[in-house]
């Protein structure tokens, strides 16, 4: 397997080169990542930001559904084939990484296409502006490439950045060509994506479809000239086949009814079944947090499902070691949490932060099972100085974390908001609650109402989703291809 060398060009003080020969390669703020980029707690970089795999056609880059996105040579990407000299940037203002790798043979026709660099494509995509934004120079935009990105960031292929449109997200949606069809994917945009006035997560586009970026946002028309030609050819063929079809109708009808009556029912789609499982587990987690929710937002289900699958896939066999350590520490951690009147599920903050590794450290200065910063640790009773750091003691740090969590609960009166406020502090939650000052704030002072109105910042949502995902995988590893004997039993007795 050929090596990959990464030159860190920024931030200042972090320059240097690293060479890797084992893949997949994970880059992010996670101390367990292969390349850790956590300079002074830089929030441009997500916990798991990008993954690089070695494939027969070359190295591929995958964005881990991050908050700030990933740019390749200045263009936002979600998946791309890498080449020697490429520049990866983690977020618009984040670290820049220059790649050095050997050239490989050209990929087969059905291999992963380089995205979004333009190249020959079987189909042309034409995007024209209908309403909601200033006219584009030159009129309609023509594309012959594997992916077209849309959003507020100037790096998008279709950018609403002059001036920035308030409804459009930075990386709002993308259109990709797969199997001769154009697929539109909403990138968890705050205000949603609509096709012909219907909100979508994904949709197959046809010639003439209208795409609206955010409710009340700009509307573009999508034209696929190749589909018009194919439709014309199909109409010609049908004129020839109609007489034959009528002749065979009687025979085929009888055969169809016999097959229909004897055929077994098809099983539900795997994706739909998995989504139902995740939704049920989110509802159960909320119940254990002394909260009730009837309808989990579909966007939350998708994100928790994604983070659960990524956790099981990226950590693999190592995860089973983490689960074994979690099973050893969890009973005592649960006892401490309950002594402070806190639900046991909050223990999975520590699972997410450190995988219950008491020696875990971040370059930002967080230490221990609960990844407490020095000032927070001292505020809640721990000794942190040049000689002693009690954050390294799992039980003492759990006592401090419990006191901090109890203070947050007394502030909000809602355990889900307590969880949301743990990592980034109360500021984000307070800002969201401030938006409800004219909307009966006491009545709606709960996590689910803020989620419904999309009032919490993306990084806060992401933190909650990852904690829930850790709880799901730890308690039901069998659903993710792991040995069920490593399942963690959580004591939810109040």
Image (cartoon, helix red, strand yellow):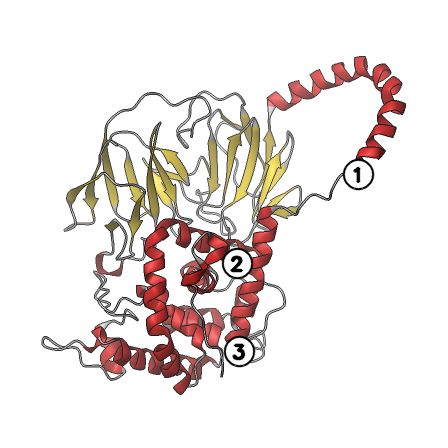
- Tell which of 42 and 17 is nearer to you: 17
Query: Mark 2 or mark 1, which is nearer to you?
Result: 1
For the residue carrying disc 3, how many other residues have a C-alpha within 10 Å: few (<14), some (14-19), or many (20+)? Answer: some
Which residue reaches farthest left? Answer: 387
Q: Compare marks 3 and 2 and give the one earlier in the sequence.
A: 3
For the residue carrying disc 2, how many other residues have a C-alpha within 10 Å: few (<14), some (14-19), or many (20+)? Answer: some
Label 2 sits on residue:
300
Left or right of 328, for residue 2: left
Label 3 sits on residue:
290
Q: Dividing the image into 4 quarters, which one contains the N terminus?
A: top left
Residue 52 drawn at (x, y percent): 32, 40
Query: Mark 1 or mark 3, which is nearer to you?
Result: 1
Q: Give the CA distance from mark 2 to mark 1.
A: 39 Å
Residue 423 showing in the rendered view: no
Say which element carries label 2.
Answer: helix
Query: Mark 3 or mark 2, which is nearer to you?
Result: 3
Residue 397 drawn at (x, y percent): 27, 77
The label on residue 262 is 1
Mark 2–mark 1 CB contact (< 8 Å): no
For the residue carrying disc 1, how many other residues have a C-alpha within 10 Å: few (<14), some (14-19), or many (20+)? Answer: few
Q: Give the CA distance from mark 3 to mark 2.
A: 19 Å
Vertical order, 24 against 100 (above or below): below
Residue 198 drawn at (x, y percent): 66, 46
Which residue reaches farthest top? Answer: 240
Say which element carries label 3.
Answer: loop
């Amino acid at each position: 397997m050929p090596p990959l060398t990464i030159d860190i060009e920024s931030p200042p003080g972090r320059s240097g080169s690293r060479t890797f020969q084992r893949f997949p390669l994970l880059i992010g703020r996670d101390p367990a990542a292969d390349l850790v980029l956590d300079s002074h707690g830089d929030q441009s970089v997500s916990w798991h930001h990008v993954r690089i795999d070695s494939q027969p056609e070359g190295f591929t880059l995958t964005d881990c559904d991050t908050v700030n996105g990933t740019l390749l040579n200045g263009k936002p990407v979600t998946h791309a084939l890498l080449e020697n000299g490429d520049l990866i940037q983690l977020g618009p203002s984040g670290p820049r990484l220059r790649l050095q790798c050997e050239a490989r043979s050209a990929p087969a026709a059905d291999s992963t296409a380089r995205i979004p660099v333009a190249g020959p494509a079987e189909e042309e995509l034409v995007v024209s502006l209908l309403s909601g934004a200033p006219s584009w120079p030159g009129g309609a935009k023509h594309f012959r490439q594997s992916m077209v990105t849309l959003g507020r960031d100037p790096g998008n292929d279709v950018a609403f950045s002059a001036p920035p449109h308030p409804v459009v997200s930075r990386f709002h949606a993308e259109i990709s060509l797969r199997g001769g069809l154009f697929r539109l994917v909403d990138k968890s945009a705050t205000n949603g994506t609509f096709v012909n006035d219907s909100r979508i997560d994904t949709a197959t586009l046809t010639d003439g479809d209208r795409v609206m970026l955010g409710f009340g946002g700009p509307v573009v028309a999508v034209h696929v000239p190749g589909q018009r030609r194919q439709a014309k050819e199909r109409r010609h063929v049908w004129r020839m086949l109609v007489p034959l079809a009528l002749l065979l109708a009687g025979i085929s009808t009888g055969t169809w009814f016999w097959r229909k009556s004897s055929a077994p029912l098809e099983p539900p789609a795997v994706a739909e079944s998995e989504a139902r499982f995740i939704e049920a587990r989110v509802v159960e987690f909320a119940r254990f947090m002394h909260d009730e929710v009837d309808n989990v937002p579909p966007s939350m289900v998708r994100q928790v499902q994604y983070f659960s699958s990524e956790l099981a896939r990226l950590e693999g066999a190592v995860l089973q070691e983490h689960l074994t350590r979690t099973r050893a520490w969890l009973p005592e951690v649960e006892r401490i949490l309950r002594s402070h009147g806190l639900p046991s599920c909050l223990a999975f903050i520590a699972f997410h932060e450190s995988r219950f590794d008491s020696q875990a450290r971040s370059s930002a200065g967080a230490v221990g099972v609960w990844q407490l910063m020095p000032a927070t640790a001292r505020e809640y009773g721990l000794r942190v100085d040049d000689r002693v750091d009690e954050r390294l003691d799992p039980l003492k740090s759990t006592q401090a974390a419990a006191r901090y969590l109890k203070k947050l609960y007394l502030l909000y009166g809602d355990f889900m908001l307590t969880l949301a406020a743990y990592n980034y502090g109360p500021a984000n939650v307070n800002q969201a609650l401030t938006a409800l000052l004219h909307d009966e704030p006491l009545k709606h002072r709960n996590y689910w109402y803020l989620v419904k109105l999309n009032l919490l910042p993306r990084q806060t949502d992401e933190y909650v989703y990852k904690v829930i995902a850790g709880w799901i995988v730890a308690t039901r590893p069998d659903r993710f291809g792991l040995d069920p004997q490593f399942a963690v039993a959580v004591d939810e007795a109040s």
